[in-house]
Amino acid sequence: MAKRQTVVLGLAVAVAMGWMVYSSFQRVEHSCELTVEFNGMRRTARGAGATVDEARQGARTAICGVLANGMDESIRCNNTPPVTETCS
């Protein structure tokens, strides 16, 4: 009985992992490239997501992660309008 439970559990884990991988590929429908100038520095990054807003936020997170130091600067950077923005 224990061997059967192990096989069933292994199959369930494999199906769950396969579903997660499959669904993660399905979500990337939009991409954005943003350029932000913050504290005298300029940075460009790309983001992708299920919606344009998710793609834009991914790019902004990548940019502000490099340009901002600390929570206050991170908030200000995230609220800074982009110099350029191209989404598809």
Image (tube, rainbow, N blue to C red):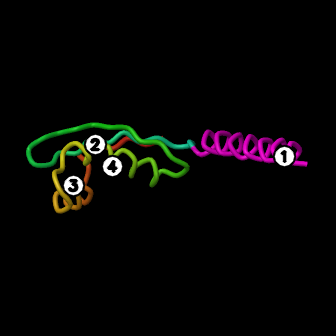
Q: Residue at x 52, y 52 (%)?
A: 51
Q: Identify residue for label 1.
A: 8
The reply to whether discs 2 and 3 touch (Cβ–Cβ < 8 Å) is no
| Left or right of 77 on screen, residue 88 | right
Q: Identify residue for label 4.
A: 61
Q: In front here: 42 or 21?
A: 21
Q: Identify residue for label 2.
A: 84
The CA distance from mark 1 to mark 3 is 49 Å
- Asked if residue 77 is positioned above or below residue 8 in the image, the reply reads below
Upstream in the sequence, badge 3 or badge 4?
4
Tell us which disc is closer to us: 1 or 3.
Answer: 1
Asked whether 21 falls inside the magenta stretch, the response is yes
The CA distance from mark 2 to mark 1 is 52 Å
The CA distance from mark 2 to mark 3 is 15 Å
Tell us which disc is closer to us: 2 or 3.
Answer: 3
Tell us which disc is closer to us: 2 or 1.
Answer: 1
Amino acid under disc 3: Cys
Give the residues in magenta: 1-27
The CA distance from mark 4 to mark 1 is 40 Å
- Asked if residue 79 is positioned above or below residue 50 in the image, the reply reads below
Q: For mark 4, does the 10 Å Cα neighbourhood hold few (<14), some (14 to 19), or many (20 or more) residues?
A: some
